[in-house]
């Protein structure tokens, strides 16, 4: 990652957790959170390294994954612009339990661990946000486990895309997402050829519209329930 720089205030102010913070609290947070640029393929955080920050994605797309000692990899989720990740790690451990890799050039926000815990100790609103965030994350991972074990590739792609439009995890994302078929494959664990077929099926079902370099979701609830 490049050296950190001062974070643009508008990114923090657009985050759900910042909406109900007092002016003095928000001003302190803004002064302590930093921004870094990460090139495509670069590591945002590495498994086993110290958990020094809570991480927000300002721009780009980040893959959360892990690789076993035998070289077998598993992708847990993707984090698009507007999302934050790592709250569980900041709360309970001193080392990252997974890798976070930039799938394309990214800008990330880094909230120091000390700032995160200060908010936890002083802000009821921040605590309420974290409860909702962790609940959404738990629901996401339970759904992903079901998809991986029970569902066909079309449904896995549908659930993967629907998860990237979760309004709590990714507020203000709208209906459009710039994402390549290769990136969808990385996040869903489906080959690029099967991703292409799945997008065709989902498009014919009226759930999304595929454009060059991205998708537009037309029916989010149906997309999330596809294959049930």
Image (spheres, helix red, strand yellow):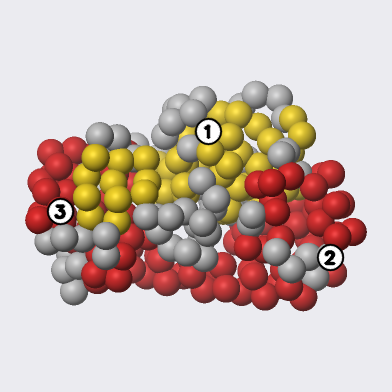
Write down the quadrant of residue 205 in the picture.
bottom left
Mark 1 burial class by Cα count in 10 Å: few <14, some 14-19, many 20+ = many
Q: Which mark is in front, 2 or 1?
A: 2
Instruction: Locate residue 219 relative to residue 178 in the image: left or right.
Output: left
Q: Helix, strand, or loop for circle 3? A: helix
Tally the numbered discs.
3
Instruction: Locate residue 155 relative to residue 132 in the image: left or right.
Output: left
Q: Which residue is mark 1?
A: 106
Residue 104, given in percent of the width and then of the height, sits at 44, 31
User: Label 2, label 3: how many angstroms apart (C-alpha)?
Assistant: 44 Å
The residue located at (36%, 49%) in the rendering is 176
The residue located at (80%, 70%) in the rendering is 123
Q: Which mark is residue 22?
A: 2
User: Label 2, label 1: how many angstroms apart (C-alpha)?
Assistant: 29 Å
Nearer-the-camera pick, 59 or 227: 59
In the rendered image, the vertical position of residue 119 relative to residue 45, given as above or below: below
Instruction: Locate residue 4 relative to residue 203 in the image: left or right.
Output: right
In the rendered image, the vertical position of residue 42 relative to residue 188, given as above or below: above
Q: Helix, strand, or loop for circle 2? A: loop
Q: Which mark is residue 203?
A: 3
Disc on the earlier residue, 2 or 1: 2
């Amino acid at each position: 990652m490049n050296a950190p720089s001062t974070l643009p205030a508008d990114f923090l102010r657009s985050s759900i957790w910042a909406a109900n913070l007092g002016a003095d609290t928000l001003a302190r947070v803004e002064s302590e959170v930093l921004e870094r640029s990460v090139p495509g393929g670069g590591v945002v955080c590495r498994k086993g390294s110290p958990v020094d920050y809570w991480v927000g994605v300002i721009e780009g797309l980040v893959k959360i994954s892990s690789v076993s000692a035998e070289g077998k990899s598993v992708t847990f989720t993707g984090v698009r612009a507007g999302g934050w990740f790592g709250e569980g790690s900041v709360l309970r451990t001193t080392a990252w339990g997974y890798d976070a890799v930039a799938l394309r050039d990214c800008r990330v926000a880094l909230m120091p661990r000390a700032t995160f815990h200060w908010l936890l100790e002083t802000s009821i609103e921040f605590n309420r946000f974290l409860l909702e965030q962790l609940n959404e994350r738990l629901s996401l991972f339970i759904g992903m486990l079901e998809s991986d074990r029970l569902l066909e590739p079309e449904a896995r792609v549908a659930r993967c895309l629907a998860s990237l439009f979760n309004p709590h995890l990714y507020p203000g994302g709208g209906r459009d997402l710039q994402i390549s078929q290769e990136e969808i494959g990385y996040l869903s664990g489906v080959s690029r050829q099967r991703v292409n077929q799945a997008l065709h099926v989902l498009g014919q079902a009226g759930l999304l519209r595929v454009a060059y370099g991205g998708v537009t979701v037309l029916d989010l609830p149906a997309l999330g329930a596809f294959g049930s």
